[in-house]
Image: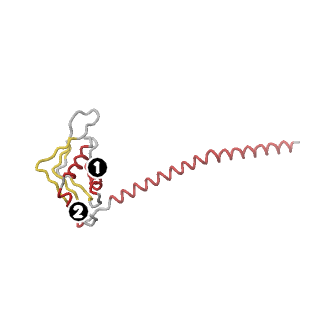
Amino acid sequence: MKKNILTIVIMAASIINLILTAVLIFTVMPAMNKTSNLIDKVASVVDLEIESKNKGEELTPIKDMDTFTVTYETNVNINLQKDAGDDTNHYAVISGIVVSFNKEEDGYSDVKALMEANSVYVEDIVKETISSYTASTISQPAIKEEAVKKLQERYDTKSIVDLSLPGYLVS
């Protein structure tokens, strides 16, 4: 009789072990798969950011660059957005705009000719970009990057590679 009780206890322990294993497989494994997928997605985003930073570091050789310059007779003041709780008027000052081109890109000469014929679009994009910032968030590299992207979109070209703001000052 003791052997039968021992057999029943072993059988019960085996069944409980089987049930707990099934619960473990059906509850923990999906959560582990979701976590693994999340980690994969984060890793792929990090790789993309690293790749995009490396692409941005490819500099155009000076010999392949040409510039278009807009020079103002007097400095131009551009009003900035107001920070929350700040009633002071802040502005940025620029004395000109210099757009740099990569001469080796397709459409370079056409885009430069368009800009030389009518520079108002370049001026508007730069002023609009600068005026979208506040005194606490403005930075010249951010302005340059955003304005170059907008100019590339406006003129539908990748030949525009850089922008300089002579006399740049924030007050």
Q: Nearer the viewer, residue 76 or 16?
A: 76
Q: Farthest left residue? A: 73
Q: Residue at 23% across / 55% down in the picture?
A: 163
Of pointers 1 and 2, the one earlier in the residue sequence: 2
Q: Residue at 22% across / 57% down in the picture?
A: 99
* CA neighbours of label 1 inside 10 A, class few (<14), some (14 to 19), many (20+): some
Q: Nearer the viewer, residue 9 or 114?
A: 114
Q: Nearer the viewer, residue 104 or 21?
A: 104
Q: Residue at 83% across / 45% down in the picture?
A: 7
**Residue type at tag 2:** Asp
**Residue type at tag 1:** Ala
State the CA–CA distance, disc 1 to disc 2: 27 Å
Q: Position of residue 35 (x, y in %)?
A: 54, 48
Between circles 1 and 2, the one closer to the viewer is 2
Q: Position of residue 59 (x, y in %)?
A: 29, 62
Q: Which disc number belongs to residue 110?
A: 2
Q: Are marks 1 and 2 in contact (CB under 8 Å)?
A: no
Q: Position of residue 13 (x, y in %)?
A: 76, 44
Relative to residue 3, is residue 54 depicted above or below? below
Quarter that holds the N terminus: top right
**Left or right of residue 43, residue 66 in this image:** left
Secondary structure of the residue carrying numbered label 2: helix
Indicate the quadrant where residue 67 lies.
bottom left
- All told, the count of numbered labels is 2
Relative to residue 17, is residue 64 depicted above or below? below
Quarter that holds the C terminus: top left
Judging by the rendered image, the residue that carries numbered circle 1 is 142
Q: Which disc number belongs to residue 112?
A: none
Indicate the quadrant where residue 151 lies.
bottom left
Q: Position of residue 95 (x, y in %)?
A: 15, 50
